[in-house]
Amino acid sequence: MNAENKITVLIADDHPLMREGIRKILSLDPRLAVVGEAEDGQKAVELARVLRPRIVLMDINLPVLNGIEATKIIRREVPQAHVIALTIHDHEEYIVELLKAGVSGYILKDVSAEGLLNAVLQVAEGIQVIHPGITKKVLRFLAQADGQKEGEGRVPLTPREKEILAYVGRGASNRQIASRLFISEKTVKNHLTRIFRKIGVQDRTQAAVYALKHGLTDANLK
């Protein structure tokens, strides 16, 4: 694959051995190219500004600037960069804060080499990757935080919008949704713009959490 067509990755972790291990795993796939490594959150932000990577693998517990704050800055200043949280933490508070910060994926460091590669490739295609066990914790935390009764807080969506949002909640890309519903990708994007506005979210990950929270992913889909 031509070098300029590769999926560029920035690794942010304060442990040299962890960075080396991740680099070696990513080097197994010719579609990926590690373009930089950062040992702290501030360095990750600085490198992201310069290198404009497509993927940032971000640890949470980074010195100088933690992973959550670094993610917020990168998502604001380098919006084309998709951040994947790669961490040992599976506490609800960390998960929700990173989702709010705009991560496109949340995976634990005990992930297999194949699992890490698949996560990077999926996020690069616009598919959010959140471990099923972590998703359950997100939903439980949100339910406790807002104290809403089941069904309360829903906004009116058309049947088609509910269908598309259900696919988003299951991690489908725009292309996959368009193929299954026999509509164009542009139509899918237009629907998502309206859906995001209606439910008050900024990105696909937040929309997916909304879909899961309100049980939309349990619907029978085509």
Image (tube, rainbow, N blue to C red):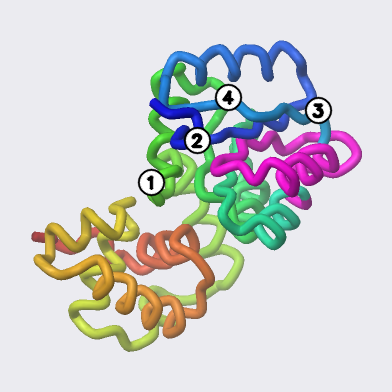
Residue 39, numbered circle = 3
The amino acid sitting under disc 2 is Glu
| Residue shown at the point (14%, 58%) measured from the top left | 179
Residue 125, numbered circle = 1
Indicate which disc, 3 or 4, sits on the residue closer to the N terminus: 3
The amino acid sitting under disc 4 is Lys
| Mark 4 neighbour class, 10 Å CA radius: few under 14, some 14 to 19, many 20 or more | some
Q: Secondary structure at mark 3?
A: loop
Give the side of residue 118 with respect to residue 13, left or right: left
Cβ–Cβ under 8 Å for marks 2 and 4: no
Please name the residue that numbered disc 4 is placed on. Answer: 109
Q: Can residue 7 be seen by looking at this rendering?
A: yes
Name the quarter where the N terminus is drawn.
top left
Please name the residue that numbered disc 2 is placed on. Answer: 4
Rendered position, 85 above or below 27: below
| Residue shown at the point (30%, 68%) measured from the top left | 165
Give the side of residue 46 with respect to residue 12, left or right: right
Which numbered disc, 4 or 1, marks the residue closer to the eye? Answer: 1
Q: Secondary structure at mark 2?
A: helix
Q: Where is residue 89? Give x, y as percent.
A: 64, 34
Q: Quadrant of residue 12?
A: top right
Q: Quadrant of residue 55?
A: top right
Highlighted magenta segment, given as a residue range? 41-69
